[in-house]
């Protein structure tokens, strides 16, 4: 069972295969992994103890960052992400921690979780992927319907109060230049950064 895996110069954490979205462009639709060697489909979700034990096999000082991102939405396990991040910061105080998310954590948890990110999460990257709620639902098929889109925008605006770097991103597949520019303007309005991600075939 792959709990942590290397991609680029970062160490990624694969906590769950559950997700509130079923995105048309998701890499897991076509591949079992992203680095050519690790299968990211889990037989079951790893326990906190198993995750810590896995980290203890790694030299965390050799990575640019630790990233919560696997074959599911990491903030489906929000409380565990917080517990693990606290533990990691206790090991290495200046360790950079990033979360790649669909931005629906407040819907998932039923509360505003963004204050709990303070001092633990250094970067939040939120998948925007569309310039309006209907298009987002068409592409991402959230279990929350069109409510998911406004929720993720609100999450981004709230998170920037507590997280040093917040990014809204889009995948360049099937997006027009105008749509990408609209998304850039949405990020600007939220007061966060913007990134265009390359589609992985």
Image (tube, rainbow, N blue to C red):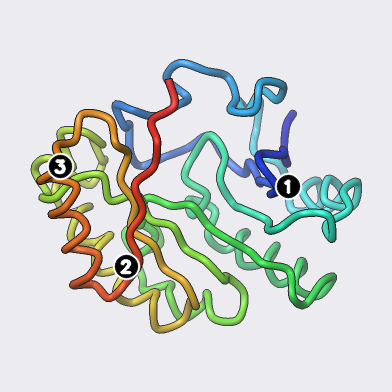
Q: Residue furthest top?
A: 30
Residue 143 in percent (x, y) is at 26, 40
Q: Residue furthest front?
A: 177
Does residue 143 appear to the left or right of 2 in the view shown?
Answer: left
Left or right side of 98 for 93: right
The residue labelled by disc 2 is: 155
Circle on res. 93: none
Q: Classify the position of the N terminus by image quarter.
A: top right
Give me the residue at 89% from left, 53% from top.
Answer: 59
Which residue is at the front of the view, 172 or 60?
172
Which of the two marks, 2 or 3, is nearer to us in this view? 3
In space, the residues marked 3 and 1 are separated at their CA atoms by 43 Å
Residue that appears at 39% across and 74% down = 159
Badge 2 crowding class, 10 Å Cα cut-off, few under 14, some 14 to 19, many 20 or more, is many
> Which residue is tagged 1?
47
Q: Is residue 132 above or below residue 135?
A: below
C-alpha gap between disc 1 and disc 2? 27 Å
Q: Position of residue 109 (x, y in %)?
A: 40, 62
Which secondary structure lies at badge 3? helix
Residue at figure coordinates x 60%, y 81% from the top left: 119
Q: Which residue is mark 3?
A: 177
Local SS, label 1: loop
Question: Distance from label 2 to label 3 (Cα)?
Answer: 25 Å
Among the two numbered marks 1 and 2 on one chain, the one whose residue lies closer to the N terminus: 1
């Amino acid at each position: 069972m792959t709990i942590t895996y290397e991609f680029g110069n970062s160490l990624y954490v694969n906590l769950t295969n559950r997700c509130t979205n079923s995105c048309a462009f998701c890499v897991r639709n076509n591949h079992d992994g992203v680095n050519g060697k690790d299968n990211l489909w889990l037989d079951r979700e790893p326990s906190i103890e198993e995750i810590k034990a896995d980290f203890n096999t790694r030299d965390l000082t050799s990575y640019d960052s630790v990233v919560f991102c696997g074959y599911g939405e990491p903030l489906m396990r929000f409380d565990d992400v917080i517990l693990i991040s606290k533990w990691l910061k206790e090991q290495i105080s200046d360790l950079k921690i990033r979360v790649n998310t669909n931005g629906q954590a407040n819907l998932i948890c039923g509360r505003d979780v963004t204050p709990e990110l303070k001092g633990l999460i250094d970067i939040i990257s939120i998948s925007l992927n569309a310039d309006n709620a209907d298009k987002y639902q068409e592409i991402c098929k959230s279990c929350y319907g069109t409510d998911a889109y406004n929720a993720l925008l609100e999450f981004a605006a709230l998170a920037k109060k507590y997280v040093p770097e917040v990014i809204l991103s889009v995948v360049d597949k099937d997006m027009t230049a105008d749509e990408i520019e609209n998304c850039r303007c949405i990020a600007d309005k939220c007061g966060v950064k913007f990134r265009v991600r390359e589609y992985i075939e």
